[in-house]
């Protein structure tokens, strides 16, 4: 099995193809205008009920979850580059279709396609970074991609509000345009990086391997637990703040700190994080996120919630920088894209479980138990992740020896 040469591992310069991916992620997120305003567009412009608009938004989410499996499969079978090209050019077409759809059936289909095609690139990008870079550079690279995503999204959410006042249709065309630009960057600057299998190496079904991979299965469960905690920031937190007499505007300002802290702090933490043990850093980051939400058990004013958001955002920075590198180290080289896709799907499951668990806990058990539950779950997944560290190191060494 042959891997693409990555050059001298002692060099601190990341390859041009990586920076093309970075630009692609930034451009793609700078144009992410539609999804944050989709429900408003459907209710105000298409005059759908709030319930129907929410269900259409859920169709986008269903497409997103499906995309993780599909994207991982395509990344391994047809290649990383072609998968990303399908994603970005296909997303542009799906966005235009959704923006022009009038019949409900077409709205449902196009919404699902926006979610499906829009997220196909994630496993492919994760796998490409793992293909191109020496393992020692992956934490830095994934951290930089995370920073680009948040920088772009922070700008897009502000500018989308201004653009929406001109007309929602403009959002769809601009979003589609940035998707085409992102695809053009891939076309021009990102080569295919999928490792070339020896002719004697048989293709393996991912489920047959993954279901026997105990370490991977535990990682999937831990990923679901983490996403369950993380999603409280976008489901339970605004309800809890409202119960404390704080306005939706206050929630908006408080949650905006998440992006601000990431943009300002991640570049500095990134230099430090590359020196740390990856599985243990991942465990500690999950713990910080859990404890950050646990702060909500003892705060009831805006500055207390600010403290909570800042704490769990610091944990999120560590998680986002290292999770891709840990799964890249864990995955068999020939199944790298599909392992990345299963990881993304696990996070997607958590985004469904989290809002359901959190809002019901808040309603029936109260805020104190809800936030303490986040802290307890954070401790539990910390213990689980920390315990897996020796096995993850052994797998990384074994994969490096056969690459």
Image (cartoon, helix red, strand yellow):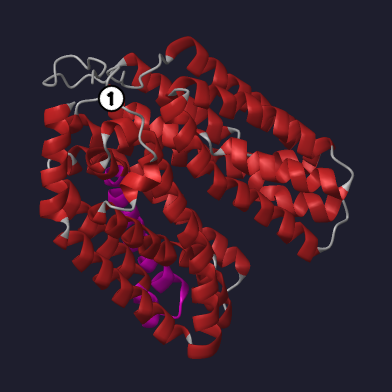
SS assignment at label 1: loop
Q: Position of residue 361 (x, y in %)?
A: 49, 82
Q: In this orientation, which residue lies closer to the viewer: 202 or 322?
A: 202
Report the residue that reaches farthest toward the top.
188
- Point out the image quarter for the C terminus: top left
Q: Where is residue 70 in the image (x, y as percent from the top left)?
A: 52, 39
Check disc 1 and report the residue beneath it.
201
316 magenta-colored: yes
Q: Where is residue 116 in the image (x, y as percent from the top left)?
A: 61, 41
Residue 9 shown left or right of residue 242 in the figure: left
What are the residue bounds of the magenta stretch?
Answer: 294-323
Residue at 85% from the left image edge and 57% from the top image edge = 48
Q: In which quarter of the image is residue 101?
A: top right
Residue at 14% from the left image edge and 15% from the top image edge = 8
Residue at 75% from the left image edge and 53% from the top image edge = 40
Q: In this orientation, which residue lies closer to the viewer: 95 or 307?
A: 95
Residue at 30% from the left image edge and 20% from the top image edge = 197
Q: Can residue 219 be seen in this view?
A: yes
Q: Position of residue 235 (x, y in %)?
A: 54, 67
Label 1 packing within 10 angstroms: few (<14), some (14-19), many (20+) = few
Q: Can residue 244 be seen in this view?
A: no
Q: In this view, does 198 lie above or below 395?
A: above
Residue 37 shown left or right of residue 126 in the figure: right
Main secondary structure found in the magenta portion = helix
Q: Quadrant of residue 95?
A: top right
């Amino acid at each position: 099995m042959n891997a693409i040469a990555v050059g001298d591992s002692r060099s601190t310069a990341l390859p041009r193809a990586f920076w093309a991916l970075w630009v692609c992620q930034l451009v793609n997120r700078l144009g992410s205008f539609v999804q944050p305003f989709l429900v408003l567009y459907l209710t105000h412009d298409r005059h759908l009920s709030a319930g129907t608009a929410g269900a259409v938004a859920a169709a986008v989410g269903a497409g997103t979850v499906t995309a993780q499996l599909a994207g991982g499969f395509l990344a391994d079978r047809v290649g990383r580059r072609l998968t990303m090209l399908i994603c970005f050019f296909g997303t542009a077409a799906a966005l235009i279709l959704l923006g022009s759809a009038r019949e409900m059936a077409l709205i449902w289909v196009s919404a699902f396609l926006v979610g499906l095609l829009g997220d196909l690139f994630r496993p492919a990008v994760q796998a490409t970074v793992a293909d191109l870079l020496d393992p020692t550079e992956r934490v830095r690279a994934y951290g930089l991609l995370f920073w680009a995503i948040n920088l772009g999204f922070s700008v897009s959410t502000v500018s989308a509000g201004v653009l929406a006042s001109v007309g929602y249709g403009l959002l769809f065309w601009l979003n589609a345009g940035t998707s085409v630009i992102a695809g053009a960057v891939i076309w021009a600057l990102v080569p295919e990086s999928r490792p070339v299998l020896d002719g004697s190496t048989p293709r393996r079904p991912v489920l047959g391997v993954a279901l026997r991979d105990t370490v991977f299965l535990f990682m999937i469960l831990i990923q679901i637990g983490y996403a369950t905690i993380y999603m409280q920031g976008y489901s339970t937190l605004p309800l809890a703040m409202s119960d404390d007499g704080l306005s939706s505007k206050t929630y908006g300002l408080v949650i905006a700190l998440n992006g601000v802290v990431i943009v300002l702090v991640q570049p500095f933490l990134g230099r430090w994080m590359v020196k740390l043990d990856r599985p243990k850093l991942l465990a500690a980051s999950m713990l910080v996120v859990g404890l950050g939400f646990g702060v909500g058990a003892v705060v009831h004013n805006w500055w207390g919630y600010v403290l909570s958001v800042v704490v769990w955002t610091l944990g999120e920075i560590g998680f986002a920088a290292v999770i891709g590198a840990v799964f890249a180290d864990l995955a068999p080289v020939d199944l790298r894209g599909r392992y990345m896709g299963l990881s993304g799907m696990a996070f997607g499951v958590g985004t469904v479980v989290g809002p359901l668990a959190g809002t019901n806990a808040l309603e029936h058990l109260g805020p104190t138990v809800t936030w303490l539950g986040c802290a307890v779950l954070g401790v539990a997944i910390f213990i689980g992740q920390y315990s897996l560290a020796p096995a993850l190191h052994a797998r990384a060494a074994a994969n490096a020896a056969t690459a």
